[in-house]
Amino acid sequence: MNEPVEPLSVFYGKQELPWDLTPFPIGIQENGKPMPQWEDLSQWMKVMVATMLGHQWDLLTFNIHLHPELEAKLVASGRLREKLAERVRKQLTRAVGKREFFFVIEGARKGTGQPVILHMHGAVCAYSPREQQVLEEALARAAGHNIAGRAQTFRAVNTKWFEVIRVAYVDYLFKFGNKFDSRLDERRLVMSQPMTAAARGLWVDITRPELRCGTAAMP
């Protein structure tokens, strides 16, 4: 309903609410069918769960344009999504260690839908607000800026702390998810292994009534 969602930590131990006052776990859908398995969720829903998970800590959202030279190189390789995912993973790991992140690749301008430089919309979990600069610099290098002799292009890197969960955020990430772009394949989502594992664990926890045993801890 596009309404703000409370952090799940409210229901998972930080305030130690009794289970009968929480909405979780939810094992049955309104139509009476069991909740779907993680593997059956849409990409949109997986990102929503990952966002709910990241909201427990500091979630740094980003909009980062690829450097034009790197874009040309990755497009020519025919494996842009895979290579970009590896670049982001490598730069974040070097900067802060293994980290939960996700992003959607798109190449159209909001409002007009006209082609523009490819860019990443996504988020990375920060374990401290002081990590903003180092995370931003790592993401910029992954996108080809300030590395291999390339300077950072104007307005290429933007980050902002996530505040309130709304479905509009994930809608925004996928707004051009089905738009044809000869530079991209059909899959536009990248989610790190740590984020996938954590989000899957959270989904299992909040949808399986048999796991309910007092106040649960965050996965």
Image (cartoon, rainbow, N blue to C red):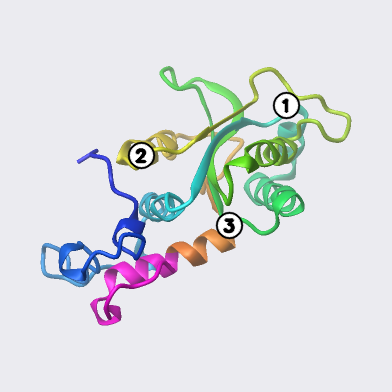
Q: Residue at x 67, y 39 (%)?
A: 139
What residue is shown with label 3?
192
Q: Residue at x 30, y 67 (%)?
A: 206
Label 2 vs 3, first from the N-terminus: 2
Q: Residue at x 65, y 50 (%)?
A: 85
The amino acid at mark 2 is Val
Q: Which quadrant holds residue 73? A: top right
- Give the Cα distance between marks 2 and 3: 22 Å
Nearest the eye: 61 or 171: 61
Q: Is residue 18 above or below residue 182?
A: below
Label 1 vs 2, first from the N-terminus: 1
What residue is shown with label 2?
164
Residue 151 showing in the rendered view: yes
Is 25 colored magenta in this rendering?
no
**Classed neighbour count for the residue bearing mark 3: other residues with Cα under 10 Å, few (<14), some (14–19), many (≥20):** some
Label 2: which secondary element: loop
What residue is shown with label 1?
68
- Give the Cα distance between marks 3 and 1: 24 Å
